[in-house]
Image (cartoon, coloured by chain):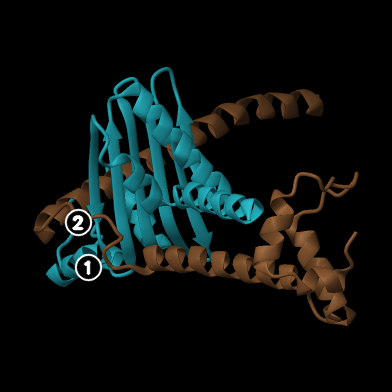
Amino acid sequence: MKKIVSFIVVFFALYVSASAQTSRGIYQKFSQGKGVEAVYVSPATFKLMSGLNMDLDDMAGLRLGDITADLTGLYILDTESKEVGRKIAEEVRKMVDAGKYELLVSTKDDTDDTSIYAHIDGDTVSDFVLLDISPDGVHWISIEGRIPMEAIQKMMAQE
Amino acid sequence: MKSLEEIEKLDRRRLGEIAHDTSIKVPDGLGRTTGEMLDALDRARGLADGGMSLRTKRTVASIAAGLVLVVGIGLASHFSPEAGPADTFDDPYLAYAQVQESFGRIGRAMKSGVDRADEGVESFSKPVEIVKKSLNH
């Protein structure tokens, strides 16, 4: 009986730790923390936005509907706390290491360390993750959903 | 020492008397667990010839029940509509502004990385030209 209980406890612990390694898990773990600013946009809100049919300003003619039609979630965490920021960065790195993310861009200078990861499937990019670490704090953005490559090119074309 | 048949015939009252009888010495090596006694009873009843022992059946049933419980809780928490976080914005226009800012930030970061990569390629091409010229001489 002790072995069965131990097995169940270990199974639960693994389940809990694994659940933190998704964008939703990371957001839920840190969003209520002190000194953390959190933003979440749900699939339902994205559907409402695509119905608004607006252009994204200064994005080379990119229409919001081009992007939001297939988006399923936007998660943002922003903190100036070094300790919390370190923990968020650690969880994000675990997530990208465990998932099928590719490192798209990594820039580092004296002050800032910025990395962008994504799933790439042919001409479609899905699940963007941006992790920006600076002396001001840590900023994390996770966008879930499919984005056409053309839309990304227009995003990069903006000044 | 009593035989298995004699033990099976003992009633609860008699078992209690034996338990409280301090004159009866426990033979050396009699360190049986309840499970081993159950296995012995099962073998005596002929359950060991092909089927699982009662102890094994109970163990399997307990593990299965535990797994069903864990999986059920996991599925319920995963698919529950109330399990997700709450939307930050009630107004889709505010959400749009945030999405725009986020995409802008990602786009600027990607452009910055690509620009730095281009600078690196440009600075690398000059030494390559120098090497080519020196090899052609």
Viewer-nearest residue: A18 or B24: B24
Labels 2 and 1 touching (C-beta < 8 A): yes
Q: Quadrant of the C terminus of chain A?
A: top left
Question: What residue lies at 61% left-to-right and 66% top-to-bottom?
Answer: B62
Q: Is residue B16 left or right of residue A38?
A: right
Question: What residue lies at 76% left-to-right and 67% top-to-bottom?
Answer: B38
Instruction: Return the residue found at the far top.
Output: A110
| Residue B54 image position (x, y, % from top left) | 73, 73
Mark 1 lies on a secondary structure that is: helix
Residue occupied by mark 2: B87
Please identify which colour was used for chain B in the image.
Answer: brown
Above or below for B111 versus B7: above
Question: What residue lies at 67% left-to-right and 29% top-to-bottom?
Answer: B129
Above or below for B48 versus A60: below
Mark 2 lies on a secondary structure that is: loop
Tag 1: Cα neighbours inside 10 Å, few (<14), some, or many (≥20)?
few
| Residue A91 image position (x, y, % from top left) | 46, 39
Tags 2 and 1 both on a single chain: no
Viewer-nearest residue: B50 or A68: B50
Chain ID for cyan: A
How far apart are labels 2 and 1 at the CA level?
9 Å
Chain bearing tag 2 is: B
Q: Which mark is residue A44?
A: 1
Q: Is residue B5 left or right of residue B89?
A: right
Chain bearing tag 1 is: A
Q: Is residue A48 left or right of residue B3?
A: left
Above or below for B66 versus B118: below
Residue type marked 1: Ala
